[in-house]
Amino acid sequence: MRKLLISVGCIAPLGGLLFGYCTAVISGALLFLENTFSLTTLQQEMLVSIILIGALIGAGFAGTLSDRIGRKPVIMLSDVFILIGGITLISADHLFTLLFGRLITGVGVGIASLTVPLYIAELSPPKRRGALVTLNQLAITIGILLGYLIGLFETDTGNWRLMFGFAIIPAIIQFVGMIFLPESPTYLAMNGQIAEAKKLFKKIRSREDTDRLIKKLKTGQEKADFAALFQKAMVPALVIGLGLSILQQITGINTVIYYANQIFGLAGFGTAKAAIWASVGVGIVNVLTTIVSVWLLDRSGRRPLLIIGMAGMTVGLLVLSLTFWLQIPAESYLSVISLMVYVASFAIGIGPVAWLIISEVYPHRIRGRAMSLAIFANWTANYIVSLTFLTLIEWLTSSGAFLFYAIICAYALYFVWRRVPETKGKTLEEIEGFWKKRKKA
Ligand code: BGC
């Protein structure tokens, strides 16, 4: 089992690394693309955001596809898209080719954002699932940091082709690595490959659990249970999955991840270099706090982290809004500290937990499709927030924009408090059972 978990834990999260890297690398590359292609503001905005359109398309079909042909080939398909996107970008000599390359890369990223947590969750022992699925979020944050760093180190050469091309390496490693990994046992069991599934289930859960599940599958009881569950529990499960996915984005994290340089500029950091370094600081805090979250999720549970994290995000944004309102000078570092508190609170709470919960709460017969819906909503919300942030600042001022996001965070705190169940240590089937019981009560 150890060997299996280590292999899955090393290869599958490369999808997260690509997710983070491809979305963040543009912030550094843009500087040089702007000069090479004489881009207008609108063209720059399109280059930043078109990856999100690709991702929502990818996430939209990845669920059905992974329910049909399996989780493993769909992860490999995401690598193919990222590879084609990368080659297109490296060889681009026209804005149109650049946009096309970013779109195709986005489709790959969207597919990976769904299939990786799904695959890891289905191959994890219940007691380790929190940490294992969150390795993907950790990889996302490392990818973001790498994206920032490569921008920083290539400042002198301006080699944007290399910046985009770097993504090809993890995509190839993952594609080859996946050949040697097994298919998800849940998918195998749903498709009648019970003997194969049993072998894997035995490695990751207790014997009684495995026997109970296999018996249910063989007698057809599992199908009957699912039909009953679907009628009774789909609505609350969908509300939670969609709610968390959308809240993860509309609480504003990517205003910081994508626009950190601009925010620090507005806060009074004089030089571009100082602002870029401050962004790297954001990236480091994001990675370090996610490591803490990997360690805590299976110990303290999901709910406490979500609640503490949401409270921290609200306070961080309120203070940030205040620093802009009172025009506290950047040298006081209050804006930097409040922004770091906000990012750390995201990284300990809704950042990883949103992905984790949506890979846990849905009944397995429709897990892929239901996740598609939630993740499609996540990318759509991401797109809207990223596209409107600078305009929001123009309308409401910086102080008003951050107050606006603080209010959304306060609502998110209420939502998680009222609705999100604790899923720590439960098998995915026990979580399904929770919905049944809750509905009856
Ligand atoms: C979110 C991304 C975000 C990243 C930041 C992920 O969980 O889905 O949109 O950029 O966290 O670490």
Image (spheres, helix red, strand yellow):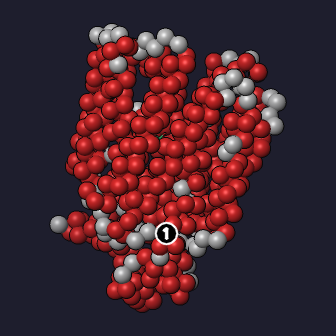
Residue 241, can we see it? no
Which residue is located at x 40 percent, y 46 percent?
290
Say left or right for 50 vs 348: right
Q: Residue at x 60, y 71 (%)?
A: 181
Q: Which residue is mark 1?
A: 5
Above-or-below relation of 142 to 270:
below
Above or below, 36 relative to 67: above
Q: Secondary structure at mark 1?
A: helix
Within-10-Å neighbours for mark 1: few <14, some 14–19, many 20+:
some
On the question of residue 335 being in view, the answer is yes
* Up-down relation of residue 60 to residue 328 (above or below): below
Could you tell me which residue is drawn at 51 percent across and 76 percent down? 185
**Pick the front one: 244 or 19:** 19
Q: Residue 103: x percent and y percent?
A: 67, 40
Query: Is 237 left, or right, of 121 in this rendering?
Result: left
Q: Residue 77 location in percent, x, y?
A: 67, 58
Residue 163, position in %: x, y?
A: 69, 36
The amino acid on which the numbered mark 1 sits, given as a three-letter code, is Leu
Pinpoint residue 98: horizontal percent, then vertical percent: 74, 33
Q: Quadrant location of residue 315?
A: top left
Count of marks, rendered view? 1
On the rendered structure, is 301 left or right of 166?
A: left
User: Image quarter for residue 351?
Assistant: top left
User: Which of these two is toward me, 377 or 324?
Assistant: 324
**Which residue is located at x 53 percent, y 13 percent?**
271
- Quarter of the picture containing the C terminus is bottom left
Answer yes or no: disc 1 within 8 Å of ligand 1: no
Q: In this view, which residue lies farthest toward the left?
A: 441
